[in-house]
Image: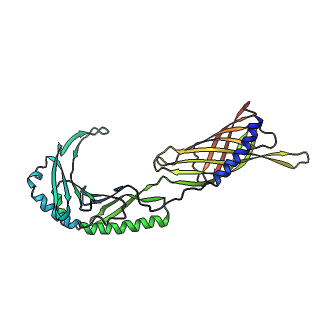
Amino acid sequence: MTTFSATLRRAVPALLCLWLTFPAPAQSKGVRPGKPNNDQVIIYLGGENRLVVPVQFVGELGRVAGLNDLVQRLNADLATVADSLLTNKYAKTVLYRETGGGGRTLKVNTKAEERTELYVEKETGLIKTLRRPDSVAVTLRNEQPLFFILDSVQVMGRLAQTDLDGLISRMEREIQAEAARQRKEELIPYRGAQLAVYENETEGNRKLTLRSRHLELDQLVIIGNTGMGVVRDRLVPEIGLGVGLQRRQGRPGALYVGFTGTMHYFFERRDDGRHRMFINTFVTFELAHAFSAEGKLWQKVGIGYLVSEQGGYFGPNTFKLTLDLTGKPRLGALHLIPELIFTDNFRTIFPGIRAGVGF
């Protein structure tokens, strides 16, 4: 056990130094997603009628151009299949593709389910009506897809009076301005918005909602703490410093892995009335994870080893297990941490408790 203790005393500080010098991956801002059609733009056109545009990056709506002319051509082509669209009993899907040389293909599919359906709501027991919308799926010549989700295909006739190109242009400017504001204020690490929604706040006044997605980023985190702990019959002040990697995961939160070095200060009064100080230092490996959707509640477990002993308060080969249920590393966080200490080669076990503030 003596050889093991000496080896571990040398290895733990070396590992801590190696961790301190480990380069953290750089955070990226505004990097475009690798997958095509990864983000989505939604423009509400009155009521529940909306235009849905899958895009690679919401800041680039330039691929979506000439919608006013498109709607005119589409309405002219729909007039040739008006008989297939007259019945409102069934929901319909129109598939419309532009081909080279000004060609177009159009196909109307009628779903087997009726447009309206009655059902009983579980929570209230009330009878509700479900109404299935029509949809017009368009593929532009540049392979850009568009989806019109409409109360009825006949709504396409009213959209001929709407300046869709103007809406797209205005929305593109507002997205760029909002994305620039978020980057300037560094609100949160973003990789472009996942969803941009343009909807009527009041009649004729549209409001942009830009929701962005968390990246899975590895961040180097340095945390500190100070407080008091009870060790056997003594109240012991302590101070610590930790370093680790935190990976943002969006939902349910984040994962943290790191090491913390904590110095415990014991004091004894000497015969001449003065005090003598003994410092006992633990190095603790910690693993934490959020278990709430908002990432506000954390659970952190740690296993520590006594790398420096003074005063004879602990025996050889001293370990401790800790559990922190509010262990998110943040400024001013108050922690109440129970612990279990194993000392004297596991022959002595006793509980402890610590309270402190993280910084």
Question: Residue 203: which quarter of the image?
Answer: bottom left
- Where residue 182 sits, quadrant-wise, is bottom left
- Occupied quadrant, residue 202: bottom left
Query: Residue 276 at x, y = what percent?
Result: 84, 48
- Residue 113: % across, % down: 18, 42
Q: Is residue 85 left or right of residue 242?
A: left
As drawn, 210 above or below 311: below
Judging depth in this view, the residue of 277 and 14 nearest the camera is 14
Q: Quadrant of the N terminus?
A: top right
Q: What colouring does the structure picture have?
A: rainbow
- Asked if residue 351 is positioned above or below residue 106 in the image, the reply reads above
Residue drawn 67% across the image and 41% down it = 304
What residue appears at the point 33 percent right and 66 percent down from the top-left corner? 171
**Which residue appears farthest toward the right when viewing the image?**
272
Place of residue 197 in the rendered image (x, y in percent of width and height, measured from the top left): 33, 59
Question: Depth check: 250 or 271 in front?
Answer: 250
